[in-house]
């Protein structure tokens, strides 16, 4: 597996990413309670074939907090910053839960920059949930932090348990608890508020790039039926339901997740540019042939 490097992307706010490999850019985006470490195994594996990058979204983990309220599309504008930082014009997006919603938003705003989409255990808007499920989502996350004065580490064990399937190991559960305990309280509260107002349902029919949908069979938050509904709306999309997986499909069933994602990404190679270094190398290979032609 490829070695992982940590880099910092300047700007307001500054962003922290893990990267591995070279080639076409694949950006892995975490969920609302996660961070870049949720993707460590995939960054190392896919770094053998791509420039695999996992970010901490603004206000998460190693990335900086920011002033003012959050416009959910700020995340999409941050993705554009990542693209420009690496000197690319197109990238492959892999987003889990909130990360999948960011991927949908980025495509709606900047479709010419998207080579492919992999939407994992995600949804379009909170109208997909019943009133009871919406209240449960908010009461588990906002009420303890805003009204009861608790910290993310206090709610992490309870929320993490709701996201794991009965098949999750203790180590997998603890990894999720750790990522939730690392949340920045103020930024997390702003994100939860913004995500409940954001909706991209109307844009599903407009997606016109290769799209893979991966859902967990045992996910009770973003159910496999939600995946089937999205699959019916996105023309030409592919759907894989991973057996025995909860919400964090890539953590609970990494081998099955990667077995679904890898052939999809391999099939899209060539749709995104491989960066300035690759272009310069191709140009250098062409120059001797051009000189030889002039000599003749």
Image (spheres, rainbow, N blue to C red):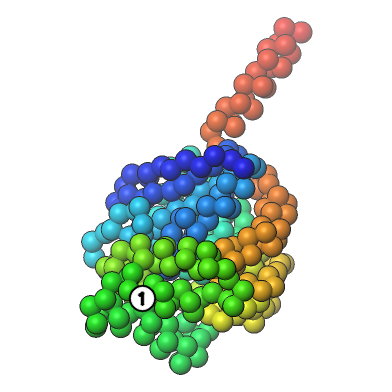
Q: Nearer the viewer, residue 292 or 249?
A: 249
Determine the residue positioned at 30% across, 81% down.
144
Residue neighbourhood size for the residue with mark 1, other residues' Cα within 10 Å, grouped as few (<14), some (14–19), many (≥20): some
User: Is residue 100 something one can see in this rendering?
Assistant: no
Tell whether 212 sits left or right of 10.
right
Tell whether 129 sits left or right of 263.
left
Query: How far across and how far down the image is residue 260, in percent?
Result: 70, 61
Q: Quadrant of residue 273?
A: top right
User: Is residue 287 something one can see in this rendering?
Assistant: yes
Tell whether 136 sits left or right of 154.
right
Q: Is residue 34 shown above or below 149?
A: above
Determine the residue positioned at 62% across, 42% down.
1
Query: How far across and how far down the image is residue 149, in percent?
Result: 23, 78
Residue position marked by numbered label 1 in the rendering: 155
Q: Is residue 58 shown above or below 120?
A: above
Outermost front residue: 170
Q: Is residue 61 shown above or below 52?
A: below
Q: Nearer the viewer, residue 123 or 198?
A: 123
Outermost right residue: 296
Q: Nearer the viewer, residue 204 or 98?
A: 98
Q: Quadrant of residue 226?
A: bottom right
Query: How far across and how far down the image is residue 274, in percent?
Result: 59, 39
Q: Quadrant of the C terminus?
A: top right
How many numbered discs?
1
| SS class, disc 1 | helix
Query: How far across and how far down the image is residue 15, in percent?
Result: 37, 50
Determine the residue positioned at 51% across, 75% down.
163
Determine the residue positioned at 47% across, 55% down.
37
């Amino acid at each position: 597996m490829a070695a992982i490097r940590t880099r910092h992307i300047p700007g307001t706010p500054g962003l922290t990413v893990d990267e591995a490999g070279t080639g076409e850019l694949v950006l892995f985006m975490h969920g609302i309670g996660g961070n870049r470490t949720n993707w460590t195994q995939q960054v190392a594996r896919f770094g053998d074939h791509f420039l695999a990058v996992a970010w901490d979204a603004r206000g998460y983990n190693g990335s900086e907090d920011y002033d003012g309220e959050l416009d959910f599309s700020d995340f999409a504008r941050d993705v554009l910053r990542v693209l420009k930082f690496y000197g690319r014009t197109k990238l492959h997006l892999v987003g889990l839960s909130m990360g999948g919603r960011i991927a949908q938003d980025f495509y709606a705003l900047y479709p010419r920059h998207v080579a492919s989409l992999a939407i994992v255990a995600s949804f379009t808007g909170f109208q997909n949930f019943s009133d009871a499920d919406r209240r449960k989502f908010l009461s588990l996350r906002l009420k303890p932090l805003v009204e009861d004065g608790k910290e993310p580490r206090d709610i992490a064990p309870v929320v993490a348990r709701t996201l794991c399937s009965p098949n999750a190991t203790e180590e997998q559960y603890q990894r999720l608890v750790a990522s939730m305990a690392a949340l920045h309280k103020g930024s997390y509260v702003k994100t939860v508020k913004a995500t409940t107002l954001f909706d991209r349902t109307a844009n599903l029919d407009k997606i016109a790039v290769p799209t893979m949908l991966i859902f967990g069979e045992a996910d009770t938050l973003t159910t496999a039926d939600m995946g089937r509904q999205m699959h019916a709306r996105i023309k030409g999309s592919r759907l894989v339901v991973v057996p025995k997986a909860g919400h964090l499909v890539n953590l609970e069933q990494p081998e099955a997740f990667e077995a679904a994602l890898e052939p999809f990404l391999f099939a899209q190679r060539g749709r995104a540019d491989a960066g300035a270094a690759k272009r310069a190398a191709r140009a250098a290979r062409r120059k001797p042939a051009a000189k030889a032609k002039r000599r003749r």
